[in-house]
Image: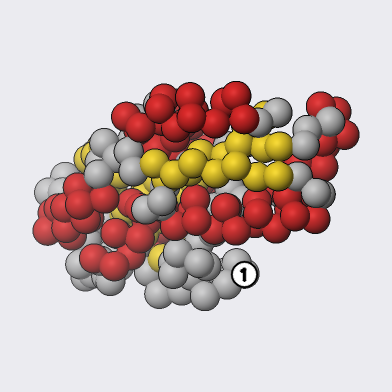
């Protein structure tokens, strides 16, 4: 369902790009639309969005040439990819995950940017509020109700201590941590936090807290999930 919604947004922006042929994004000589899709890492959830966009547009008869890019967890590479899309003048950019969306939004002003798999687009500076996008940027949030999750977790498993691993450099993760801390405080759950910088540190971080907690809760942290 999420893939279909994302693809619908992209389809709308592609239509706009085709109608504004005088804009920055130019179609190929044969009229084919060019779409740049970037993701922060290879991960089943992110891969599904990438594939879903292509499948849905193909099903709707949209002929497109795709430039598929993977930053492999590197924020600097994310910026380079956004710059490449701008230089190549793609018609639409689909940015999967917060680092890719922020890089695209900061680097490109005259090409439509659709973000997905972004937990808190407001805190990330992508949009002023969740009602609508602004300028050339729009997309979907995958934010969930952390308090409701923990309340159920506590009721079923009776947890008193909770472990959490997050990527310190990801805006999504920082926003989720603040909400998680608040939820744990309200539910009288002791939170044990371990931060990481890259996916290679996830195993060590897990081993550092696994014997100190009753359970581990992970938010939508793409670096953690990729490990």
Residue drawn 60% across and 42% down? 192
Figure quadrant of the N terminus: top right
In the picture, residue 88 is in which quadrant? bottom left
Residue drawn 26% across and 36% down? 72
Residue 44 x %, y %? 45, 26
Left or right, 227 with respect to 151, comes to: left
Residue 93 x %, y %? 32, 53
Left or right, 208 with respect to 191, comes to: left
Q: Nearer the viewer, residue 222 or 14?
A: 222
Residue identified by numbered label 1 = 131
Above or below: residue 135 compared with residue 179: below
Residue drawn 71% across and 37% down? 161
In the picture, residue 104 is in which quadrant? bottom left
For residue 100, say whether it is visible.
yes
Figure quadrant of the C terminus: top left
Secondary structure, mark 1, is loop
Above or below: residue 116 compared with residue 218: below
Residue drawn 62% across and 69% down? 131
Residue 146 x %, y %? 70, 47
């Amino acid at each position: 369902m999420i893939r279909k919604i994302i693809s619908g947004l992209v389809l709308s922006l592609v239509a706009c790009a085709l109608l504004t042929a005088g804009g920055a994004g130019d179609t190929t000589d044969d009229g084919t639309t060019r779409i740049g899709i970037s993701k922060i890492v290879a991960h089943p959830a992110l891969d599904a969005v990438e594939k879903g966009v292509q499948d849905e547009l193909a099903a709707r008869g949209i002929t497109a040439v795709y430039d598929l890019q993977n930053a492999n967890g590197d924020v600097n590479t994310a910026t380079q990819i956004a710059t490449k899309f701008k230089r190549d003048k793609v018609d639409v950019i689909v940015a999967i995950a917060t680092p890719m969306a922020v890089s695209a939004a900061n680097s490109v002003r005259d090409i439509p940017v659709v973000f997905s798999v972004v937990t808190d687009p407001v805190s990330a500076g992508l949009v002023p509020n969740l009602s609508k996008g602004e300028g050339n940027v729009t997309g979907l949030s995958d934010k969930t109700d952390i308090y409701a999750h923990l309340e159920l977790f506590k009721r079923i498993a009776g947890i008193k201590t909770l472990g959490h691993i997050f990527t310190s450099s990801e805006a999504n993760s920082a926003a989720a941590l603040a909400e998680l801390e608040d939820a744990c405080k309200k539910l009288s759950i002791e939170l044990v936090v371990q931060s990481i910088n890259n996916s290679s540190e996830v195993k060590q971080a897990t081993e550092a807290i696994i014997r100190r907690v009753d359970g581990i809760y992970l938010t939508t942290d793409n670096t953690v999930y990729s490990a």
